[in-house]
């Protein structure tokens, strides 16, 4: 089972992905690479070379405005070890220095305390909130941001 199919890992999404949803996620991100030139990167543990998750910048639209955001999904065996902070910081630097972003955001559910801590550790602050429509539900998300 891949980490996308683990409900503990995917709790912020509200469900574990089926095989078909994993393939759809991969296809969506391949399209992002074709259209935008970037998306999630593979997160690799330096000592072992093990694939531990995905972390990356991407373009997303919130209430009609496009932003560069960073997101992270790690296998739970690698939670609490600083990998999300390290990867998110690298992606923030990449967005500012290579993509020339003036501002970078992260969308985080209020109950996702671990992701909120990651955003705060890389210098992001809450700038607002919005209701994200996903799978027939409206889900409150906080918008964390950092400017260059």
Image (cartoon, rainbow, N blue to C red):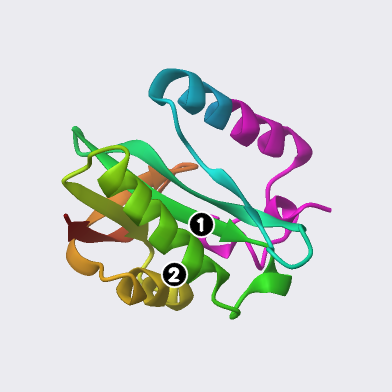
Is residue 3 covered in magenta? yes
Who's the residue at 43% across and 77% down the image? Answer: 113
Instruction: Single out the residue that lies furthest toward the right.
Output: 1
Q: Position of residue 78 (x, y in %)?
A: 67, 72
Q: Position of residue 98 (x, y in %)?
A: 32, 40
Residues at marks 1 and 2 touching, judged by CB atoms closer than 8 Å: yes
11 relative to 37, above or below: below
In the foreground, 40 or 148: 148
Label 2, secondary structure: give it. helix
Q: Position of residue 23 (x, y in %)?
A: 70, 32
With 64 as the anchor, is 116 left or right in this view? right
Q: Is residue 139 among what the camera can see?
A: no
Region in magenta: 1-27
Residue at image mark 1: 72
Label 1, secondary structure: give it. strand
Who's the residue at 45% across and 42% down the image? Answer: 136
Local crowd size for mark 2, using a 10 Å CA cut-off: few (<14), some (14–19), many (≥20) = many
Residue at image mark 2: 115
Q: Is residue 97 among what the camera can see?
A: yes
């Amino acid at each position: 089972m891949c980490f996308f199919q683990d409900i503990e890992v995917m709790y912020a999404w509200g469900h574990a992905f089926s095989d078909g949803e994993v393939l759809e996620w991969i296809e969506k991100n391949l399209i992002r690479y074709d259209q935008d030139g970037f998306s999630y990167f593979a997160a690799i543990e330096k000592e072992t070379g093990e694939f531990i998750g995905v972390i990356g910048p991407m373009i997303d639209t919130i209430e009609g405005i496009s932003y560069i955001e960073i997101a992270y999904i790690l296998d739970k065996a690698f939670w609490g070890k600083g990998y999300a902070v390290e990867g998110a910081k690298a992606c923030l630097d990449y967005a500012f220095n290579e993509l020339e972003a003036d501002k970078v955001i992260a969308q985080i559910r209020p109950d996702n305390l671990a992701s909120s801590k990651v955003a705060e550790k890389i210098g992001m602050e809450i700038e607002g909130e919005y209701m994200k429509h996903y799978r027939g539900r409206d889900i409150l998300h906080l918008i964390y941001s950092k400017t260059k």
